[in-house]
Amino acid sequence: MPTLRRPSARVAVAVSLGSLLLGCSVPDLAPADDGTRDERPTPTSDPAASPAPGADRARELLGLVRVVERRPDVPGYDRECGPDGGCVFGTDWSDDTDAPDGHNGCDTRNDVLGATLRDVRFSERSPDCDVVAGILDDPYTGGRLDYATEGSQIHVDHLFPLAAAWDLGAAGWSAAERARFANDTDLELVAVDGTANLQKGDSTPASWLPPATTYRCTYVTSYLEVAHAYDLAITATDVRVIEPVLRKSC
């Protein structure tokens, strides 16, 4: 059974880019109105070199998650849910789980789209669920997709790929626990450009990072949040890739 450690208030999907930027700003010193000098201490180093909150959280998580030397190849992974399939993570986008938005009458994909797209519109026959229009500002590429004309190109990605999760801990969970993980709208799922998602495949940070460099800090922090919450291991190579991201992008 996974040890689910839920971070507070959806910090999960990490720290917003806006707050990252704010975390790095330092006000200029200026004379006060009465002619006296502002008593705030003068920074002793370049403010930009100070770690932003996202970097702090990611480094904390790096000290908490399990690290293995390499990703094992655990037999039995099979997402096919037909008569002969293993269906190890349950039916795609099932509402019948105890995931955060489970049993709300809407499939998981539409839950994510409805919460993510700008200017979202729903169908008249299913006004609280069935997304028919909206704009995706894709975090992976920085591009923009119009759901009305490009809906098939918008994928809902598992931040921690299901195949990797199977190898790094989920193979030992129950079927219900894996179904919950696969439909966790709080931590594990994000709407993205389909081409980028296909390029990612079942890669971990060791071999894939989002093309949009401004999102990489959020991406690796979110990945580590999932690993910590579900007690999934990351590899030593993941760590070697993540550490430079924290220095350059956070």
Image (cartoon, rainbow, N blue to C red):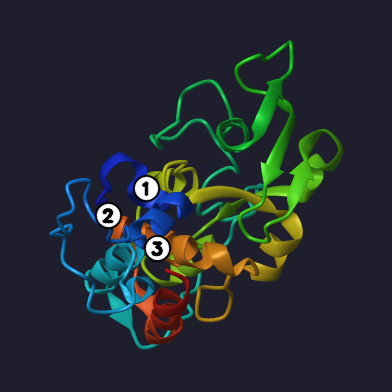
Front-most of 167 and 130? Answer: 130
> Going by the image, does 205 lie left or right of 144?
left
| Alpha-carbon span between mark 2 and mark 3 | 23 Å
Badge 2 marks a residue whose secondary structure is loop
Q: Is residue 161 left or right of residue 240?
A: right
Disc 3 marks which residue?
221
Which quadrant would the N terminus be assigned to in this image? bottom left
- Say above or below: 123 vs 92: above
Mark toward the start of the polypeptide (3 vs 1)? 1
Q: What is the C-alpha distance between the residues marked 3 and 1? A: 23 Å
Q: Position of residue 84 (x, y in %)?
A: 64, 54
Closer to viewer: mark 2 or mark 3: 3
**Residue name at image x 44 percent, y 35 percent:** 97
Mark 1 crowd level (few <14, some 14–19, many ≥20, 10 Å Cα): some
- CB within 8 Å, label 2 to label 1: yes
Residue found 65% across the figure and 69% down from its top: 211
Q: Secondary structure at mark 1?
A: helix
Q: Nearer the viewer, residue 188 or 34?
A: 34
Q: Earlier in the sequence, mark 2 or mark 3?
A: 2
Indicate the amino acid at tag 1.
Glu
- Against 179, is 52 above or below? below
Q: As drawn, which residue projects farthest toward the right?
A: 149
Q: Amino acid at mark 3?
A: Thr
Residue 71 visible in image = no
On the image, numbered disc 2 is attached to which residue?
1
The mark found on residue 177 in the picture is: 1
**Disc 3 versus disc 1: nearer the observer:** 3
Question: Along the line of sight, which residue is nearer the eye, 50 or 35?
Answer: 35
Q: Residue at x 34, y 68 (%)?
A: 55
